[in-house]
């Protein structure tokens, strides 16, 4: 599959990225433990939960992109679905982190200390963790099963070494029948998409919305998974742009790919804002105290109102105005910056949703060294996971052979 | 040979415009008769008063609003197919885009009639428009009903312009093949289009912008329709999921209507090679997707009603499933979410008869969805002594018949007088 | 493609069945003494656009301008109407921005589309019936028609040029209404 020409081309220095990533992850873990031991363990847990949600959502959303491309038989995306598949390497880490969330349950769920008037049928620790845990396991298994078939289609016979390759592509030297792989990839893709919608809704309700147990919004689940796809695309653009910058033309990513994924990103930026507004306008009109208090706290009282405007600006107004332009979408360096800012904005959006419910009183929010280091730790884990995956599957960062990568029927 | 494929496309589609036979005119005549029945019923209502309909306290919105929402919903997939799928470069949309856009235009027109009908004193309709006047009375732009006026009229204007702009090259084709008076008419209609490179250059760009603007518009229009309900506080109406749920439902019903219209069209006009089975299959697959979203929304509403432990919400939702309107409710659930799942089987989605039957069933289901939403929530809201039921009267059925006939009447006239498949767009996907 | 008004010109159209041949002929024509007037095609063609080295259309500017005007007029109208009426309804502020987003949004789209149509019409010069003078009906069917102008005495040479390129020449003698020839 890969010719000698590729050997002369620049390579991704995956080993160094993995090392740096692991160092950062270690640093983050140390910061987390230090904050736990300090005066406000609450703060550490809050930062942990936000990061768990944001980084898991990125991985889930990016893999969703690969699934959607396969199911809709899209031909415009070229090497992008392959790169998106590499985010699945974060799935096991995400599952591990979810187990850690369990350890922080006493600090994380404000309703543990409340009379729930019958809501305890849904809001209780054993049920919550078992349903969300099962949900994540199902989602991630389907994700891996899908990725496995998708990669077999893209790569064909397994010619490389490594346990990860063997897991996903079958034993070394084994070949796959493209026709049956295609059929399986499509079925598994559909299943992953369905599981994605259900499981992310569940996480949205359980780990975000119910933190204020008296507030409900029926759209919250859909809002969660649309947001996850939005940041999944953002993360994918960052990865693709970085690969393009490092490898140049040999990675097979063209300006057209960046323009197209940029448009999709723009569309989901709009959709995210739409889902935000759609909830706001209904609650604003209804003017029912049990609904409005949630919104008033977050958008009209200091200091959260400043945060709310920041989020709106960073995640919608700014990208909207910038992405209207076609040319910026094809500038990798610029897009890395823009997407990073948007991802930070979504991090703040999680803080906005969770902070008033979790924070010790609504006196304010803290973004300081502990939050920064913990986030850096997650970034390191994500970078290490993705780089490890790409190291095992170097084909994904190389231009496809002349014949079309995916046959369409 | 792609070039001979071009003339084959022209011939096939221009053949649909040949003078029609007797059975066509009988069909059109019958539909026209239906329109007259509707007009007579409306006239009767204008003379006697809005009381001839079944709307009363507490159910103030009956079939007029149901049909309004139903037709606006039908309108949506036209834009979905021609604009959104154009942006995603899905080539299978090209054979059906024109028919779907036309459906949009006529469906919006039909929908637009209902607010007039429901108004009772239809001549007061100008009160909805921001007309400067001596008493300084302005419409209240905070009212969801005003959003409707703004959104629906924008939608109608935009979809008509989109439709017409997209038709220019085809009108020129007809002009070039016509003679006499017909040639003169089409010369004017095509605005002198010649397919010069300067024309195409701007046309392609403008068409892209049309698509990019129509996409958020179509999402906003049905969101606005949903807010007629969601912005109030009636149980079962006041819920944040309504806007996306209505949009998905609208596309669901619209796609089903596209199948319902195209399947007879392709056999009547021998368009089987143009509107292939693969195109219909793709519509069916999209229907699975929209059906799943609709199912997800139904489920979410029930789940949140239960989770919130809000007694009014729980009661209304329990009553929907088990109360007086439970038959309508289960028709809605089964037709919209269960039956479309049959499309998962390749055998079902590649046969004309099941495709057609299921598409009709989805239309029925979507009509009942609007029935369930509009009627049940106000039939049993907060105050038990004000509970009441609703049933449509004969006048309402007459008007409903009239508007359904009007839609099909207009569509039938269209397919014989203007190209129901875009020849130009077909050539674009046929080119080597 | 500016028309020089001085010397009388005769128009000759080369009709090609193949897009590639047409694009090649356009490139050749650029090096010849004859003037390229127009290229008619049944479908928008990237190859021909590339051969003509067309610039990007500026319709988008009209669309954008329309959108911006619409955005402000939508909000403006809603705010103006509510300040005229000046009545608190349902406990909501008189000038309430949350619902006015909807009016502003719809007007943005409406006016952007108006701008788009206006841009399309002004940029293409439609409606116009002048172009039908030197036009061949086959161009809307399956032919790519290249219209070129030359001095009256050269029209045979020009016709030969098109024949050499693989096209079928059609010589327009005097400005007369088109006589469509069905393929």
Image (tube, coloured by chain):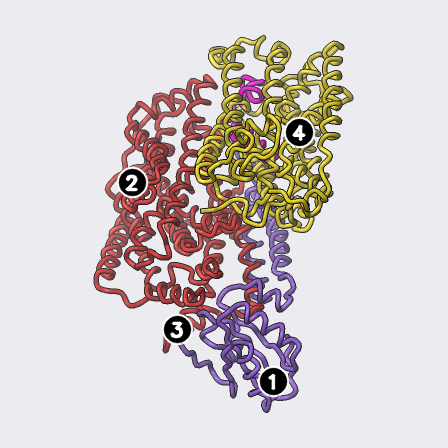
User: Chain coloured purple: which letter?
Assistant: C
Q: Chain of mark 3?
A: B
> At 37% across and 40% down in the image, what residue appears?
B65
The alpha-carbon separation of the residues under discs 1 and 2 comes to: 74 Å
Magenta stretch? A205-231
- Mark 2: which secondary structure? loop
Q: Which residue is mark 4?
A: A388
Q: Position of residue A42 (x, y in %)?
A: 69, 13
- Same chain for mark 4 and mark 3? The answer is no
Q: Which residue is mark 3?
A: B177
Q: Which chain is yellow?
A: A
- Badge 1 density bin: few <14, some 14–19, many ≥20, Cα 10 Å: many
Are the residues tagged 3 and 1 within 8 Å (C-beta)? Answer: no
Give the chain letter for red. Answer: B
Q: Mark 4 and 3 residues: CB-CB less than 8 Å, in contact?
A: no
| Residues at marks 1 and 2 on the same chain | no
Q: Residues within 10 Å of mark 3 (few under 14, many from 20)?
A: some
Q: Is residue A27 left or right of residue B420?
A: right
Q: Nearer the viewer, residue B43 or B232?
A: B232
Disc 4 and disc 2: Cα gap in Å? 69 Å
Q: Quadrant of residue A38?
A: top right
Q: For numbered disc 3, what is the local secondary structure?
A: helix
| Real-space CA distance between mark 3 and mark 1, rounded to the nearest whole angstrom | 29 Å
């Amino acid at each position: 599959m890969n010719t000698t020409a590729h050997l002369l081309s620049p390579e991704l220095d995956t080993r160094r990225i993995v090392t740096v990533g692991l160092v950062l992850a270690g640093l983050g873990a140390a910061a987390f433990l230090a904050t736990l031991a300090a005066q406000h363990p609450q703060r550490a847990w809050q930062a942990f939960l936000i990061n768990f949600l944001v980084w898991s959502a990125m991985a889930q959303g990016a893999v969703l992109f690969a699934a959607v491309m396969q199911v809709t038989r899209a031909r415009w995306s070229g090497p992008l679905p392959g790169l998106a598949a590499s985010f699945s390497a974060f799935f096991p880490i995400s599952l591990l982190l979810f187990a850690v969330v369990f350890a922080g349950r006493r600090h994380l769920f404000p309703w543990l200390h409340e009379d729930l008037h019958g809501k305890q049928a849904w809001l209780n620790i054993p049920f919550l963790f078992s349903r969300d845990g099962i949900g994540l396991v199902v989602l991630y298994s389907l994700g891996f099963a899908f990725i496995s078939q998708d990669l077999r289609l893209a790569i064909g016979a397994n010619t490389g070494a490594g346990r990860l390759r063997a897991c996903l592509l079958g034993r070394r030297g084994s070949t796959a029948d493209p026709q049956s792989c295609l059929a399986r990839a499509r079925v598994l893709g559909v299943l992953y998409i369905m599981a994605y919608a259900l499981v992310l809704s569940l996480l949205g309700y359980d780990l975000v919305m119910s933190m204020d147990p008296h507030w409900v919004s029926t759209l919250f689940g859909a809002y969660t998974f649309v947001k996850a796809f939005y940041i999944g695309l953002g993360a994918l653009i960052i990865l693709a742009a970085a690969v393009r910058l490092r490898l140049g033309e040999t990675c097979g990513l063209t300006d057209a790919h960046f323009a197209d994924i940029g448009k999709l990103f723009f569309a989901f930026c709009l959709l995210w804002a739409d889902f935000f507004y759609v909830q706001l306008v209904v609650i604003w009109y209804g003017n029912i105290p049990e609904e409005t208090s949630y919104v008033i706290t977050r958008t009209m009282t200091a200091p959260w109102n400043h945060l709310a405007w920041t989020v709106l600006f960073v995640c919608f107004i700014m990208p909207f105005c910038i992405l209207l332009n076609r040319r910026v979408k094809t500038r990798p360096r610029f897009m890395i910056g823009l997407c990073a800012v948007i991802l930070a904005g979504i991090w703040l959006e999680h803080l906005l949703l969770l902070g008033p419910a979790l924070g010790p009183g609504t006196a304010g929010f803290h973004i300081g060294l502990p939050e920064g280091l913990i986030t850096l730790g997650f970034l390191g884990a994500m970078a290490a996971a993705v780089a490890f995956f790409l190291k095992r599957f170097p084909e994904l960062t190389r231009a496809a052979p002349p014949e079309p990568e995916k046959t369409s029927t | 040979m792609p070039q001979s494929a071009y003339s084959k496309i022209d011939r096939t589609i221009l053949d649909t415009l040949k003078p029609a036979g007797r059975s066509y005119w009988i069909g059109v005549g019958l539909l026209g008769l239906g329109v007259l029945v509707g007009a007579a019923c409306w006239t009767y209502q204008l003379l006697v008063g809005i009381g001839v309909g079944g709307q009363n306290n507490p159910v103030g919105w009956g079939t007029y609003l149901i049909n309004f929402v139903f037709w606006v919903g039908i309108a949506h997939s036209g834009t979905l197919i021609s604009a959104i799928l154009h942006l995603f470069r899905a080539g299978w949309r090209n054979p059906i885009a024109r028919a779907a856009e036309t459906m949009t235009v006529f469906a919006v027109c039909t929908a637009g009639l209902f607010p007039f009908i429901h108004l009772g004193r239809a001549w007061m309709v100008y009160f909805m428009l921001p007309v400067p006047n001596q008493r300084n009375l302005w419409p209240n732009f905070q009212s969801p009903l005003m959003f409707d006026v703004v959104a629906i009229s924008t939608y109608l204007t935009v979809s008509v312009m989109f439709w017409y702009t997209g038709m220019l090259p085809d009108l020129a084709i007809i002009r070039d093949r016509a003679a006499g008076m017909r040639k003169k008419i089409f010369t004017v209609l095509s605005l002198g289009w010649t397919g010069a490179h300067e024309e195409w250059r701007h046309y392609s760009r403008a068409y892209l912008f049309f698509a990019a603007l129509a996409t958020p518009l179509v999402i906003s229009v049905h969101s606005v329709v949903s807010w007629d309900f969601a912005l109030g506080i009636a149980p079962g109406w006041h819920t944040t999921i309504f806007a996306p749920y209505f949009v998905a439902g609208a596309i669901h019903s619209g796609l089903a209507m596209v199948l319902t219209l195209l399947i007879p069209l392709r056999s009547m006009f021998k368009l089987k090679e143009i509107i292939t089975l693969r195109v219909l299959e793709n519509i069916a697959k999209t229907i699975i997707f929209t059906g799943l979203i609709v199912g997800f929304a139904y489920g979410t509403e029930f789940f949140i009603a239960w989770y919130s432990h809000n007694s009014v919400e729980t009661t209304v939702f329990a009553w929907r499933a088990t109360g007086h309107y439970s038959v309508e409710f289960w028709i809605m659930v089964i037709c919209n979410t269960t039956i479309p799942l049959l499309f998962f089987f390749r055998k079902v989605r590649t046969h004309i008869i099941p495709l057609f039957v299921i598409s009709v069933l989805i239309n029925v289901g979507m009509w009942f969805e609007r029935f369930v939403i509009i009627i049940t929530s106000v039939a049993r809201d907060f105050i038990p002594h004000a509970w009441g039921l609703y049933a449509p009267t004969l006048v309402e059925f007459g008007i409903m018949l009239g508007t359904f006939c009007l839609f099909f009447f207009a569509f039938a006239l269209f397919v014989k007088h203007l190209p129901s498949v875009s020849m130009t767009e077909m050539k674009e996907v046929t080119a080597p | 493609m500016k028309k020089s008004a001085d010397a009388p010109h005769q128009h000759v159209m080369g009709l090609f069945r193949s897009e590639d041949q047409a694009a090649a002929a356009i490139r050749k024509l650029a090096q010849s003494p004859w003037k390229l007037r127009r290229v008619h095609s049944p479908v928008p063609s990237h190859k021909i656009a590339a051969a003509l080295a067309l610039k990007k259309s500026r319709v988008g500017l009209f669309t954008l301008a329309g959108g911006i005007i619409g955005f402000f007029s939508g909000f403006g109208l809603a705010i103006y109407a509510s300040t005229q009426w000046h009545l608190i309804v349902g406990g909501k502020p008189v000038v309430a921005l949350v619902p006015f987003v909807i009016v502003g949004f719809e007007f943005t789209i409406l006016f952007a589309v108006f701008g788009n149509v206006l841009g399309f019409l002004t940029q293409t010069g439609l409606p116009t019936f002048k172009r039908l003078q030197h036009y061949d009906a086959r161009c809307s069917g399956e032919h790519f028609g290249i219209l070129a102008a030359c001095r009256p005495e050269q029209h045979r040479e020009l016709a030969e040029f098109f024949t050499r390129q693989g096209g079928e020449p059609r010589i327009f003698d005097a400005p007369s209404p088109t006589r469509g020839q069905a393929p």
